[in-house]
Amino acid sequence: MRTIPCLILLVLALTGCVKTPPGPRIDPALASLIPPDTILLAGARLEALEKTPIYLNHLAKRAVPLIDDFPKQIGLDVRRQDLWELLLISDGKQSVVLGHGKFANEAEPRIQRPGATRFGYKGYNLVGDERDAVLLISPSVIGYGPTPALRSLIDKKEKTTGAPAALAAQLKEMPPEAVLWAAYGGGLTALPFNAPGDLANMNKIIASIQSGSVYLDLRTGVNGLATGTCGSEQDAKMLYDALRALQGLGRMAITKEQPERGKILDGLRVTQESHKVNIHIEEPEELVDTFLNLVGLGRAN
């Protein structure tokens, strides 16, 4: 039974303009590209992440899709330490991932994508096709996603003033030490990915969430908070009950040979406050490897 991984996936799904203290800082080079109709932002502050004890002790020698997939998608051989920040931007229909890092020692990085062609749009160069492409913004900023979404990003560039107010307010509720975070302003009618079996029936509940956020602080263990605010107290109770049921099923699936999985569930505490449901995440460092193996986030090299 995959109940525990599903529960953790759901935690991640409840996921100034340019700078919004005291929350996690978005680099101005990326913040200046956020369109005003954005309803979901998700950030990975990789430069800060790679300095945490959790990364140094548990992730440095693992394959980590979050860090390793972006260079493959854009067609560049980029070292981990040269990728500083990732930012996912979504309007609920299409998503774009922006990367900030050292991509070239020259005016423009040389993208190597088999079968891709180079074309221009309003003074910017793209490499790809009409389905998806890489957007070359500067030697240190690159975007990847559906070509129509990249063109829309360019169209709206002059209208942006950074994160929309609703998302900026969510960021202000997070600690500046958060290295992985997401802020959601409402508008999704389903999970933005194909949900596994135990979560396939969660789309109705997800649609009831009007706003939400999640952040992780990896300085000492895996600590964080996922929050979803629903349209009514009844909807919040449905979400709370669903999460508690998943926890119960997860405990039933644990065998005597897997006591550490029970400890992981102990570190996920669900609470309800009127219209709001919270998942408090407190996993000690000694459980990090078990946690990573359980959710499939990285394999040791």
Image (cartoon, rainbow, N blue to C red):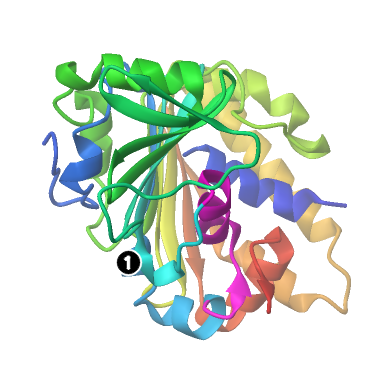
Q: Give me the residue at 12% from left, 49% from top.
A: 21
Q: Is residue 214 visible?
A: yes
**Residue 262 in the figure: left or right of residue 240:** right
User: Based on the displayed image, in which of its 4 quarters is residue 235 positioned?
Assistant: top right
Q: Does 290 appear in magenta? A: no
Q: Main secondary structure of the magenta part?
A: helix
Image quarter in which the C terminus is found:
bottom right
Vertical side of 272 occupied by 258: above or below: below
* The residue stretch that appears in magenta: 60-75
Q: Position of residue 81 (x, y in %)?
A: 38, 71
Along the viewing direction, whichever of 12 and 117 lies nearer the viewer: 117
Q: Give me the residue at 67% from left, 48% from top.
A: 7
Q: Position of residue 157 (x, y in %)?
A: 22, 22
**Residue 248 in the figure: left or right of residue 10:** right
Along the viewing direction, whichever of 105 and 202 lies nearer the viewer: 105
Q: Which residue is mark 1?
A: 47
